[in-house]
Image (cartoon, rainbow, N blue to C red):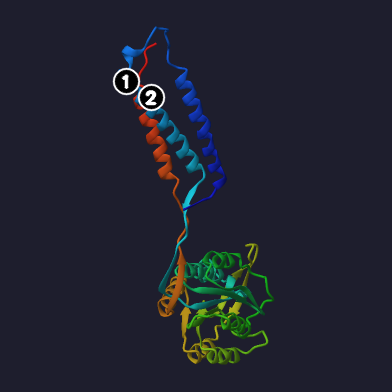
Amino acid sequence: MNFLHPGLLFLLLLLIPLVAWHIWKWRNASPSMGISTVRPFARVKSSWKVWLMHICFILQLVAVASVIVALARPQTHDSERSSRVEGTDIVLCLDISSSMLATDLAPTRFQAAKDVATKFVNQRPDDNIGLVVFSGESLSLMPLTADRTAVINAISSVGMGALNDGTAIGDGLSSAINRLVSGKAKSKSIILLTDGTNNAGDVAPTTAAQIAKQKGIKVYTIGVGTNGSIKITDPYGFSTTTMETKIDEQALKSIAELTKGKYFRATDSKMLSDIFAEIDSLEKTTLDVSKYTFTEENFMPWILIALCALSLRLLIRYTVLRRIP
């Protein structure tokens, strides 16, 4: 056991003057009367109530000492526990091009993707997860980490317009691969979500898929939304435009097949949520991990001791040792 505020334990030294004060007070508290000899009273024993008075003082000291120990915040040490869990290295690769503002998925393709990605991360406590976004170029927002809160915050902070517009699927896939290369898990995978056709960037999607295959990385591709004419509302809700979109399903299928992943198509929010649930069930592997327990506060027993000691003292003081003025 350790203490969060060990310096407060020096307050226990206050018990020494309290004891000294009690002894001094007791010696000078008894009335006296001058007589020739006390020999007749030599065999008279002290009343048991006298001992109760001392016990009351001891209970008072116990209460004070217990409160001081509680204020010092006693805590148990963290403990380490090794176990085998299911986990993997995963990078989320999300399209943030302007077409992702289409409203065929409620409220928009972009927000629906962020919502299901957040839920997916919450359900993977033992994975290392990274985040890459792309439009006309790619950007790695989060390296592989087991900190789910950090990943969720990164997903939440993603906004439209951060990159040049377009759809650079190959560049996004390449950035995700670069993140996974340093991962230590045996199973590595990428979840690539897009709603268009590769029309920007420096790396062809097929080239990036070949690299992923060489590195043993699975790519799960998701085509989001419907083909054809779609309505797009700007991020501030001031204007609405119409745009023609077409998902290159053949390219996405080829990427998935080449890397031994799987292609999915989502035309509404529920389908997208079901797809992530299926990927969650597919991507499982066993890992040896060490877990640490949280520090446990142990001040409550000391508070209870103080309350019990104080209550017992008051009970004795106002019953057996009650004084009548």
Mark 1 vs mark 2, foreground winner is 1
Q: Is residue 156 above or below residue 54?
A: below
Res. 163 mark: none
- The residue shown at (62%, 90%) is 204
Give how far across and how far down residue 100 sits, in percent. 58, 73
> In the image, what residue occupies the spot 60% across and 92% down?
207
Q: Residues within 10 Å of mark 1 (few under 14, many from 20)?
A: few
Q: Which amino acid does label 1 sit on?
A: Ser
Q: In which quarter of the image is the C terminus?
A: top left
Q: Position of residue 270 (x, y in %)?
A: 43, 71
Whether 128 is drawn above or below 296: the answer is below
Which quarter of the picture shows residue 94? Answer: bottom right
Residue 310: image quadrant is: top left
Q: Which amino acid does label 2 sit on?
A: Met
List x then y, in percent, for residue 153: 57, 64
Q: Mark 2 points at which residue?
A: 53
**Depth order, front residue of 157/180:** 180
Could you say whether the residue bearing mark 2 is in a helix, strand or loop?
helix
From the top left corner, tell me how far across and down residue 214 is, in percent. 54, 92
Q: Which residue is drawn at 47% across and 35% down?
A: 64
183 up-or-down from 1: above or below? below
Number of the label disc, if any, that sits on residue 47: 1
**Observer-nearest residue: 298 or 242?**
298
